[in-house]
Amino acid sequence: MTIPTRHDWTTEEIQTLLELPLMDLLWQAQTVHREANPGYRVQLASLLSVKTGGCEEDCSYCSQSIHNSSDVSGFEAQMRVEPVLERARAAKEAGADRFCMGWAWREIRDGKQFEAMLEMVRGVKGMGMEACVTAGMLTDDQAERLADAGLTAYNHNLDTSPEHYDKIISTRTYEDRLETLQRVRKAGVTLCSGGIIGIGETLRDRASMLQVLASMNPHPESVPVNGLVAVEGTPLEGQQPFEPLELVRMVATARILMPHARVRLSAGREQLSREAQILCLQAGADSIFYGDLLLTTGNPDVEADRQLLADAGVQANWQNNASSLVNQAPAST
Ligand code: SAM
Ligand code: DTB
Ligand code: SF4
């Protein structure tokens, strides 16, 4: 069977998938995933916040917005090139094959800091890893310069549906977001774009966001699925925790809609049991963030993740170059 790639999914069809009995949804997702990724290979991506806090946007989930009162004073506000590359080297040694760098900016500005960003991208690529940047809006020229530096992917999430968007962010529009993605695509850099669950959205909103992603042609190469990390000091701090099986449903549906995208099980893993994470891998997630920190919040530690992957019997992409995962014994006896 060859999996058909469609760009004409309707929101109704997608909502129907999200609402399927879980076993039926998992069966469909697995059928697609087994064909698209027969080895169940999982990419390990490490994240680093290069520029932390002080962002002018008012994203209501984010610890780094000046509109919120979260404490990010423990982080270095702006890292320099060499320490960033040292962290990239360490991530590679630990087994990551993608290094993602974040800047808490509304948009990229030209100047010293942008030149440093380009140097970081060249450095990460020079180590043989994929390089990803997330830094807000950008111009065509900046996108081209990032492409010339060798950038693999630019992360810019839709976060939620067009309908729910203005309840979450008021300082930029959905249209701004889509335009940035088009600029990135035009420059020949791959797209990393996804969203968050647990931010007060309805099932319809989830379907609607997935519809926007699935109607892109080509599909984004990478689709992060985040569960809200309710950070103190943000308007969403008191939000009801997301239901783990809802995250499984999002992953499974994203896999069915975008068979060849990397579906990234992103923020929120600390709130998931090992079993729920394994269900996500089974449902079609083929990447995790690897390393003890996301940007400003925690992530499962490296040893726990190695054990998780070994217990799930999935292979990390880099496995051919490293031995530690291959030799890891299952946790249970
Ligand atoms: N400033 C850039 C931007 O917004 O595109 C890049 C950094 S931003 C932190 C990257 C993405 O992380 C957001 O779009 C959002 O989807 C996700 N994110 C941020 N804070 C989160 C949280 N508390 N819980 C879950 N996901 C979060
Ligand atoms: C994405 O979708 N999730 C990552 C990455 N892209 C940049 C970021 C998650 C951030 C979680 C909250 C924090 O650590 O501050
Ligand atoms: Fe946070 Fe990015 Fe929004 Fe700034 S633009 S507040 S860094 S999510």
Image (spheres, rainbow, N blue to C red):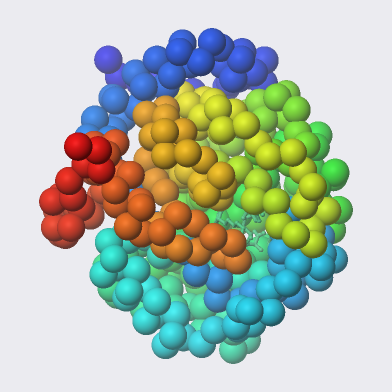
* Residue plotted at (25% across, 49% down): 317
Nearest the camera: 10 or 267?
267
Q: Position of residue 170 (x, y in %)?
A: 86, 53
The quarter in which the N terminus is drawn is: top left
Residue drawn 77% across the image and 43% down it: 239
**Residue 250: x percent and y percent?**
56, 30
Q: Quadrant of residue 313?
A: top left
| Relative to 34, 74 lies left or right | right
Q: Is residue 150 above or below residue 154?
A: below
Q: Image check: 167 left or right of 284?
A: right
User: Is any atom of residue 242 visible in this view?
Assistant: yes
Residue 60 in view (yes/no):
no
Spot occupied by residue 81 in the image (x, y as percentages of width and height): 46, 86
Compare residues 292 and 55 and report the one nearer the observer. 292
Q: Residue furthest front?
A: 333
Q: Can you say whether 143 is above or below 200 in the image?
A: below
Q: Residue at x 69, y 79 (%)?
A: 73
Give the quadrant of residue 125: bottom left
The quadrant of the picture showing ligand 3 is: bottom right
* 79 sits to left or right of 264: right
Looking at the image, residue 54 sits to the left or right of residue 149; the answer is: right
Residue 257 versus residue 323 in the image, above or below: above
Residue 20: give x, y in percent of width and height.
56, 12
Tell me the quadrant of the picture where the C terminus can be found: top left
Residue at 40%, 76% in the rendered image: 87
Residue 217 sits above or below residue 323 on the image: above
